[in-house]
Amino acid sequence: MTRFAIRVAFAARATIFAVAMIAAAACASARPEQQLQATTETGRLVPLDSVTISYTVGAVHIIQRPNYANDVVAVHLYLLGGRRQLTPATQGIESLLLRASKYGTMKYPDDTTRRAWSRTGSDLLLDATDDWTLFGFRSITQEFDSSWNVFADRLMHPTLSSANVALVRNQMIERVRERHTSPDGYLSLLSDSVSFNGQPYALQPEGTETSLPGLDSAALAGYARAQIVTSRMLLVVVGNVSRESVEHAVAATLATLPAGQYVWALPATAPRELVPAVLRERHVATNYVLGVFEGPPASSPDYPAFRVATELLSSRIQQKVRTEHALSYAAFAPFTDRAIATGGIYFTTNLPDRVLPIIKEQVDFVRHLPTELIDMHYFTDAFIFDYLANNSTDNAQADFLARAQLYEGDYRKASDAMEELRRVTTGRVRAAAQHYFSHIQFVYVGDTTKVMRSAFATF
């Protein structure tokens, strides 16, 4: 998968690699990503990049890739900032605002909002993430206008009655509680709070049991007035809709919002204050372990090599821990694709004292990667295979374009990602591992008598 790709299920990567090496090898010399095409309004096939355009309506920045091959339209509005928008007291505020808007807007009061949306048949997209909140929809051409009208009114004019805000807030609090009762959910929350203590990535976009009760209708309305502004917006539209239709829709709605003074920038890296491995006793069927190490900014030349190094580590951990020694049902190296990337070490096991030395061996292997044993093209071809697969949907293409624009400063650089991966060498992977596979912050949930805290210090 490329640096602009959607996350994948890493536990299945060994199988994907095997398929990818065959598929990509057959067409690697042809630079297959350059042969991805869009269909023009006249039915002519042209390269994707040749029809992708960037323009503004009012102060709203729009990237559009028309494709008339079918009737699907993907609309992605990125509200920039993500976790950096939050404070400990406002965690969950943007998600709560957008979720509560389905219960009434100025143009579609009360249940009219949900009924109007239901008639469109469109899928709503709402995902509060590390660097932005995605709010959008996937529709068909014939329903673009009606879907846009409901979508825009939800963003611009939610009524936010106290009763409806309380309803959604209680639903979100329940989901937070469910995360605490799930071993994996609790592990993730614990890791965020420990690994990024004092930094924005420690904050929770979906809120916490402490922050959500304090977010009422007045707080949401105040946030909307201050933060639903065009300087925080990037709109990406992919699919069967004309520029004129998009311009008209935006001009009548989003372009009338205040500009605000938000300026997008990649977050600054800050020294992480590591603590000894954090162990939490839980009566669960197995033990859960997650270690996190920080990678380079998404704009760094090291980013592709770090991505490949983490994937190589993932495949080796899975092979050694799960396949060869049968010590875990899930063991891999997760990768988080965001403004400042992170990699990690994840496994579940009843024998953590046996697994940790095996994983340490794999970390050391990648840190001292022997040139003569590893052909990086096997791994880069696998990412290219994923790129081709992911680019088959309008939603995925919108995400690629947005990430290129926000992380690299130019949506056109999405097409360069494959060449960057092809230039990754064994030496660059080894250097990335030596530099970034360090300062690993571990958290452990389970039977704390099964492992010594000192066992994590060897990394």
Image: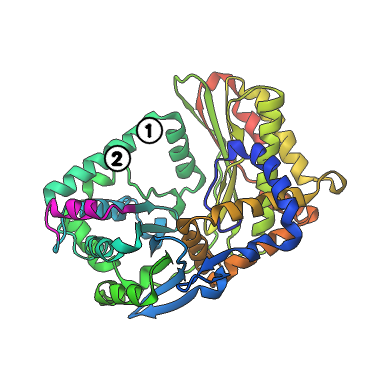
- Which sits earlier in the primary sequence, circle 1 or circle 2? 1
User: Which type of secondary structure does the marked residue at label 2 adopt?
Assistant: loop
Q: 416 or 88, which lies in front?
A: 416
9 in relation to 80, above or below: above
User: Which type of secondary structure does the marked residue at label 1 adopt?
Assistant: helix
Residue 138 placement, left or right of 150: right
* Dot 2 amino acid type: Glu
167 in relation to 144, above or below: above
Residue sticking out furthest to the right: 372
Residue found 28% across the figure and 46% down from its top: 211
- Where residue 51 sits in the image (x, y, percent)? 51, 74
Disc 1 + disc 2, Cβ < 8 Å: yes
Mark 1 packing: few (<14 Cα in 10 Å), some, or many (20+)?
some
Q: Is residue 270 visible?
A: no
- Where residue 118 sits in the image (x, y, percent)? 23, 51
Q: Is residue 430 visible?
A: yes
Q: Is residue 267 magenta?
A: no
Mark 2 packing: few (<14 Cα in 10 Å), some, or many (20+)?
some
Residue found 34% across the figure and 57% down from its top: 139
291 in relation to 120, above or below: above
Residue 438 placement, left or right of 203: right
Region rendered in magenta: 108-124
Question: Rounded to the nearest whole Å, what is the CA distance between mark 1 and mark 2?
Answer: 10 Å
Quadrant location, the C terminus: top right
The circle drawn on residue 350 is none
* Dot 1 amino acid type: His
- Where residue 458 sits in the image (x, y, percent)? 69, 35
Q: Which residue is mark 2?
A: 209
Q: Which residue is mark 1?
A: 180
- Where residue 313 sits in the image (x, y, percent)? 69, 41
Residue 326 placement, left or right of 60: right
